Image (cartoon, rainbow, N blue to C red):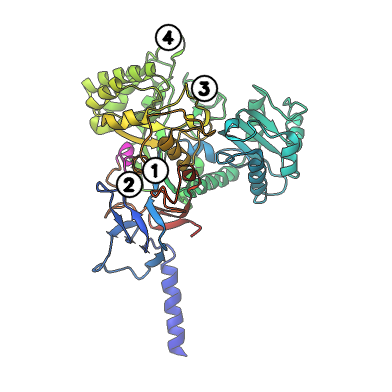
């Protein structure tokens, strides 16, 4: 009896000791490492959150807490990295958010919002703010008020994005009680949407923000995205200490001083399931760029740990004013400071004119402070040309491509020119720019890169397609560069952080997964630093 009790106590002690273990063996898989040789192995061993063996681990002494997982032939890839999104904004959405980026019809919308309500308290607001376009729906229209009522009879709802804003009857009643004009059909037009948004924000608690941030991380984890480079938010009017910086009240706006508090609290509570890389967005209008200057003087680049880290400046370093042929007069001053203090940087651009202006400023800064080791890049680049790419490459800068035109693009407005960019030899990685105008789902972004087709199935970016291998590399191995973590993240190699996505099907095999089937890929097992954060295996 004593022996039995001793063994039981020993097992219990070992179990408790293993609760926080980050030790796994993944066996019987098709594991695409995304190393320089694109090696494929059948097993990997993770010890203390890092890859200890890639392939058979014959002589490796395993930690007693090591758990073996049989992948049963599933394809696995490195945890995907989104080099430019707005996950902080996503987490701060008021209400119980549901993304509709994968919905293909009004019936899909009804099903998805109904499923979301099933996991929300009775009467809680369900919200969809951005990241969809009516082009993706078979009906090419918004749901009607009656269709929303049929799906959500007991929850108020608002849906805003590429096609307008609509609410259901309970939402209409709430918004009208707050003085927001809503049509009989449930439409909320123009500036009335901001009034509706601010009515929801006024009800939000810090507990709501933490819950929303947990939901946001879980959503990305479900696709196999394990790291997000967050590119900030516009400053809400009324935020303190803006010192004349540009401010705007939009769905993409937050208080710049408190917007990270939910993530920081969850990190302290050890509840983060997703890696966050912070890029500080500033939009100074003054010549002396005071907000940027104070960020640089009072923050440290690359400060943090493997889960949350301050990584750079972006996607703006000064107010970006290109209307009427003007250009930002304080931009070079801002970038000279960023370079002097040794920070990574990424700049938003939407036109060739912006690409060329940014490149010219990069060249001026580079003449004073070489930027190659800082890993500067231009992001979005839907219209960039080969000559500008060559100029950027010559000074060691890169580009970051984002398929936001998957939602809204047309044959006359496709891009970025993926094939031209990759063939130029410049450093390039991919991301989403999601939270309001694009999709977080990396497989929709990859579908767009591979096929050139938008959410309606229209070919809008012909002759710029990438291979499946190339597209996935842009979402994995090439993305550590932007945060100076190319030796730490992005591929399955010995010593690197053990982030893995086990896929629902074999992405690499077109006989099993057609081009259209890429859009259905999900992660069935997501691992971050040796910890399982999503499990549907």
Instruction: Assess whether mark 3 and mark 1 are in contact (beta carbons under 8 angstroms).
Output: no
Report how many numbered discs are placed on residues in the image. Answer: 4
- Residue at image mark 1: 81
Q: CA distance from mark 1 to mark 3?
A: 29 Å
Note whether 76 is above or below 80 in the view shown.
below
- State which tag comes first along the sequence, 3 or 4: 3
In which quadrant of the rendered view does residue 474 lie? top left
The answer to whether 388 appears left or right of 409 in the picture is left
- Residue at image mark 2: 489
- State which tag comes first along the sequence, 4 or 1: 1
Q: Residue at x 68, y 41 (%)?
A: 125
Q: CA distance from mark 1 to mark 2?
A: 8 Å
In which quadrant of the rendered view does residue 372 lie? top left
- State which tag comes first along the sequence, 1 or 3: 1
Crowd tier of the residue under label 3, counting other residues whose Cα lies within 10 Å: few below 14, some 14–19, many 20 or above: some
- State which tag comes first along the sequence, 2 or 4: 4
Instruction: Assess whether mark 2 and mark 1 are in contact (beta carbons under 8 angstroms).
Output: yes
- Residue stretch in magenta: 477-484
- State which tag comes first along the sequence, 3 or 2: 3
Identify the element where label 3 is drawn: loop
């Amino acid at each position: 009896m004593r022996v039995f009790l001793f063994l039981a106590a020993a097992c219990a002690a070992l179990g408790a000791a293993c609760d926080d273990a980050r030790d796994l063996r993944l066996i019987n898989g098709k594991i695409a490492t995304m190393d320089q040789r694109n090696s494929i192995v059948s097993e990997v061993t993770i010890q203390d959150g890092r890859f200890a063996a890639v392939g058979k681990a014959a002589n490796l002494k395993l930690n007693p807490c090591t758990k073996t997982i049989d992948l049963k032939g599933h394809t696995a890839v490195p945890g995907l990295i989104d080099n430019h999104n707005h996950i902080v904004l996503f987490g701060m959405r008021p209400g119980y958010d549901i993304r509709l980026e994968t919905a293909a019809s009004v019936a899909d919308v009804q099903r998805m919002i109904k499923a979301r309500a099933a996991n929300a308290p009775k009467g809680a607001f369900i919200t969809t703010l951005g990241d969809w376009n009516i082009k993706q729906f078979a009906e090419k229209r918004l749901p009607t008020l009656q269709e929303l009522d049929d799906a959500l009879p007991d929850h108020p709802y608002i849906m805003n994005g590429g096609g307008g804003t609509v609410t259901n009857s309970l939402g209409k009643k709430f918004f009208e009680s707050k003085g927001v004009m809503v049509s009989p059909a449930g439409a909320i037009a123009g500036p009335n949407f901001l009034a509706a948004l601010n009515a929801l924000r006024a009800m939000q608690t810090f507990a709501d923000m933490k819950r929303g941030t947990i939901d946001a991380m879980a959503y990305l984890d479900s696709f196999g995205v394990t790291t997000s480079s967050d590119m900030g938010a516009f400053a809400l009017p009324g935020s303190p200490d803006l010192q004349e910086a540009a401010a705007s009240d939009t769905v993409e706006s937050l208080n710049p001083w408190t917007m990270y508090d939910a993530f920081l609290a969850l990190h302290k509570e050890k509840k983060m399931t997703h890696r966050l890389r912070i890029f500080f967005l500033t939009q100074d209008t003054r010549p002396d760029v005071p907000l940027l200057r104070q960020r640089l003087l009072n923050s440290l680049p690359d400060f943090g740990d493997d889960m949350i880290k301050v990584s750079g400046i972006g996607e703006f370093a000064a107010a970006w004013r290109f209307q009427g042929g003007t250009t930002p007069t304080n931009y070079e001053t801002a970038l000279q400071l960023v370079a002097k203090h040794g920070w990574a940087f990424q700049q938003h651009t939407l036109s060739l004119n912006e690409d060329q202006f940014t490149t010219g400023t990069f060249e001026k800064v580079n003449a004073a402070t070489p930027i190659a080791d800082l890993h500067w890049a231009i992001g979005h680049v839907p219209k960039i040309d080969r000559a500008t790419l060559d100029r950027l490459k010559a000074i060691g800068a890169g580009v970051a491509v984002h398929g936001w035109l998957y939602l809204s693009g047309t044959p006359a407005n496709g891009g970025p020119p993926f094939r031209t960019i990759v063939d130029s030899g410049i450093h390039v990685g991919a991301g989403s720019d999601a939270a309001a105008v694009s999709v977080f789902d990396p497989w929709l972004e990859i579908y767009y890169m591979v096929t050139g087709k938008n959410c309606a199935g229209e070919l809008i970016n012909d002759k710029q397609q990438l291979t499946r291998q190339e597209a996935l590399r842009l979402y994995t191995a090439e993305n550590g560069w932007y945060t100076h973590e190319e030796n730490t993240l992005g591929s399955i190699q010995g010593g690197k952080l053990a982030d893995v996505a086990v896929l629902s099907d074999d992405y690499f095999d077109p006989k099993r997964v057609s081009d259209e089937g890429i859009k259905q890929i999900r992660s069935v097992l997501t691992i971050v630093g040796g910890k399982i954060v999503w499990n549907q295996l």
